[in-house]
Image (tube, coloured by chain):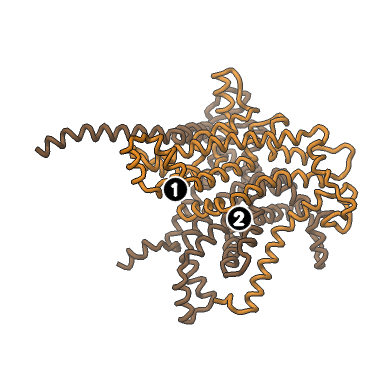
Chain colours: A brown, B orange
Amino acid sequence: MGSVAAAAVRPRRSAARRREAIAGILWSSPWLVGFFLFTFGPMIASLYLAFTDYTISNLSPKIVGFDNFARALSGQDHLFWPSLVRTLQFAAVMVPLGVGGALAAAVLLNQGIRLVALFRTLFFLPSLTPVVASAVIWAWLFNPNWGLLNHLLAGIGIKGPKWLSDPDTAMASLIIVALWGAIGGSTMVVFLAGLQGVPKEMLEAAEIDGAGAMRRFWTITIPMISPTLLFNLVLGIIGALKVFASPVVMTAGGPSYATWTFILHLYQNGFQFFDMGYASALAWVFMVIVVSLTLLNLRVSRSWVYYEGEARDDAR
Amino acid sequence: MLARFAPWRGALYLTAVLLSAAFMLPFVFAVGTSFKPPSLLHVHPPLLFPPLSQAQPENYWRVFNFPGIPFATFYANTLIITLSATLGGVLTATASAYGFARFRWPGRDLFFTVLLATLVLPEEVVIIPKFLMFHLIPDWLFGQTWINTWRPLIIPSWFGGGAFAVFLLRQFFLQIPRDLDEAAVIDGANSWDILWSIIAPLSKPALATVAVFTFLGHWNDFIHPLIYLNSTDKFPLSVGLRWLTQQPTDPIEPRENLLMAASMLMITPAILLFFSLQRYFVRGIVMSGIKG
């Protein structure tokens, strides 16, 4: 009797399942369609274009094999390696200072001082500033003759550099602008939330056992917030490698290509030279770099990121 | 904790005040400059603020009336682009997140993993094919290109509003008890009723968060308008402000005052939005960090 009932129910249930599946796919269809239309499709298209010679005037892409990649990697495009190296240098300075600075600012705000909300807001406002506006403002601060920065430096007896107009200091100037926008921004807010999740009893127990402030920070706080740290590192690296608007607005990539970043190079090839095939190859090189750095980061993180749930398994 | 000792506490406050000053200084100098007459721009030593008798609040007005430079148009353009993209983003992200959070369908978990992967995929990777697509496909279908229109800046937002928005809303919807849905189904509600009268009203904080982030993303967007637009009268503020910095002035006189006024005009809406929706901001950032 039971099987008869089951047989009667099963088709009805599977029909309900089907209806549910169709409804779900329909509801999610905006994102699903958008993913194929504006992400997956274009990625495949750019992979194809990367192997072609395609300028917007010559309407049919001509397959050229690995020529575009060879042109980039062999140094025939003499700006490829310098732009890549400069972008990596920018990230190598920006990520530790940006993420470390954000962590330091969050620790500062987590010390139980008064007016935390006010300080947090003041730290946060630069990150709200549109990059173009902050670039325009900072170009004026950096002005070697009339800007505020060199005046302040002169006040403490330092002769200020020429900032954006000197190839030796232009990249450092862009890093200063980026740090101004990054340290108090969402990275710091995420760290603050992470710090508030560190169990107070654990810190107090360590203090009673005689652990100093630094010791407690390195052996309790850092492991407890390590997932947050990983998240901020991953996003920080990607964000730094994408640097584009500030060099475009402040230096146009100069002086003498000192701030010629990778995305700026891609932009010039794609939208000023309309060399779409070559620019697509550059886009794929960029993606491979970003994806490998992210995977490397996640891989290395296994040795230093601590997840509470996992620890319980280990103990067993 | 260490914060109990008075000298240490003093050092903490001093650091916090000095850091705040460092973060605020560029704004102070920009606001001060925006009120200066041209004669006070290139002077030694630089003044933070002009003397009250020489202050020119009309600089803000002059930005809008700068000969040949349609700053008011930039402003209106930005509002139109940003608001239409935000509306589409919030609506379609809500629908998409609802599908992920409340229905079982084959491939759902796979696509959710894909969605998470696109969170770290740089948008710059697909700008070339997207540009070609917005040029070639409308040309082939309707005989006219969509380059130099706002469509490429708005239409993609109407397809799910971005992975971050879908992700954030899905996480939020999952926290709403299913019992509420089931009770409504017994009362004869369909999936549309459940979203509209149960889930959406309970998700106002998450919806506000997504709206704020989408708004700011479009307000600040630079690379897309730079690529797609070439007539000045279609520029939003980001590209417009950069264009302004490149224009020669006639007569040749310093005009950092006008550039600073223009920058402050671009920043103000973002800051006002932040102050009016501060708690949604913090919540959104925290959600993205903790669950991501």
Occupied quadrant, residue B87: top right
x and y percentages locating residue B146 in the rendered image: 61, 25
Q: In this view, does B11 lie above or below B68?
A: below
Determine whether B99 is above or below A159 in the image: above
- Viewer-nearest of labels 2 and 1? 1
The residue tagged 1 is B172
The residue shown at (53%, 31%) is A49
User: Percent x, y for residue B240?
Assistant: 72, 37
Q: In this view, does A217 lie to the left or right of A19?
A: right
Q: Distance between the residues labelled 2 and 1?
A: 23 Å
On the image, the x and y values in percent for residue B113 come to 41, 44
Question: Do dots 2 and 1 share one subunit?
Answer: no
Q: Is disc 2 in contact with disc 1, using a CB cutoff of under 8 Å?
A: no
Outermost residue to the front: B187
On what subunit does the disc labeled 2 rest? A
Tell me if mark 1 has few (under 14), some (14-19) or many (20+) residues whose alpha carbon lies within 10 angstroms of its own. Answer: many
Label at residue A185 = 2
The chain holding disc 1 is B
Q: Is A37 left or right of A278, judged from the image as shown?
A: left
Whether residue A277 is visible: no
Q: Nearer the viewer, residue A101 or B151?
A: B151
- Residue B98 visible in this rendered orientation of the protein: yes
The 10 Å Cα crowd at callout 2, few under 14, some 14 to 19, many 20 or more, is many
Q: Which residue lies furthest to the left in this view?
A: A1
Tell me the SS state at disc 2.
Answer: loop
